[in-house]
Image (cartoon, rainbow, N blue to C red):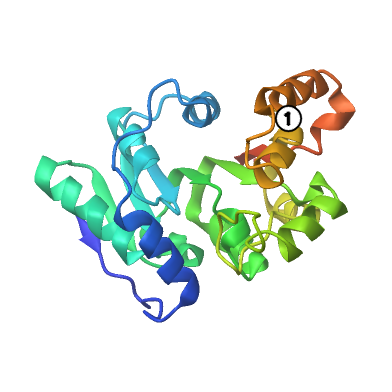
Amino acid sequence: MSDPAPDPVPAGSTELAFWDARYEGKAIAAAAPDDPVLRAALAHFGDVRGLHVCDLGSGTGEFALAFLRAGARVTAIDQSEAATRRLSEIAAREGLEGLRVVHGDACRLGDWGPYDRVFGALILHHLEPFPTVVEALTRALAPGGKAFFHENNAGIGAPALWFRQHLAGRLWFPKHGDAQEHPLTPAELRLLRTALEVRVAFPELALFRLVSHYVFRDRCVPALFRWLDEVGYAWPPLRRYSYFQYLYVSVREP
């Protein structure tokens, strides 16, 4: 079923127009069982059968559908009208019981909770003000609840962030996100830790391949840059400069 947003986002939002255009033509399918992000989340969540799982920033719902397939009740929340409309159409057409699709503000996730588990893939760094996000997430999680986030990482270093801010989307350098977003900062991570237990892991080193992608458009021996990442991952101090990270979150015991 589909819930309306209590306070719909203005239709003229440049950020929303970007994501609506991106999701309008995107295929809708459940994430594969061997998807590394899904596997990491389920390893943290445990058996989700019968649990209420929130897919925060669900997009076209690949992870929402995967959690539903694993036996959970799922609430999928996204601000993109195109994404939630298309996922709602799939749910209605296929008679997917246990899936609720919400076109609404992710900062108000608690309005449709509480949740036993909360999942997000590259969503936290979009949400502001971040203190409101942390408060909402803390209130939305049921006692004993857990959350898992696949996020980017502002700790990658100042030169990379300067490049992202000033050159991505200009000249021949590609840009894949909207104009308002920024990578999750160490300060935001510290704020999250004031309210919840958080363990950070770097599942891979995504550093040198960024040079290959953004500077050379993967046209200059990309295999070499992937190899440099694989070799660099073997040196633990370098891992914290990876552009991607997993956040394993748990409600603190009273």
Where on the picture, by quarter, is residue 208?
top right
Q: Quadrant of the C terminus?
A: top right
Q: Which residue is mark 1?
A: 205
Q: Amino acid at mark 1?
A: Leu
Q: Nearer the viewer, residue 192 or 221?
A: 221
Residue in view at x 34 percent, y 33 percent: 66
- 233 horizontally vs 23: left or right: right
Where on the picture, by quarter, is residue 129?
bottom right
State the image coordinates of residue 153 (x, y, percent, origin top left).
Answer: 72, 47
- 34 over 146 or under it: above or below: above
Q: Nearer the viewer, residue 81 or 43?
A: 81
- 177 horizontally vs 205: left or right: left
Q: Is residue 142 visible?
A: yes
- 85 horizontally vs 104: left or right: left
State the image coordinates of residue 57 (x, y, percent, origin top left).
Answer: 45, 54
- 144 over 232 or under it: above or below: below
State the image coordinates of residue 181 (x, y, percent, origin top left).
Answer: 62, 63
Q: Which secondary structure, mark 1?
A: loop
Q: Quadrant of the N terminus?
A: bottom left
Residue in view at x 27 percent, y 69 percent: 4
Q: Nearer the viewer, residue 68 or 135?
A: 68
Mark 1 closeness class: few <14, some 14–19, many ≥20 residues within 10 Å: many
- 40 over 5 or under it: above or below: above
Residue in view at x 18 percent, y 47 percent: 90
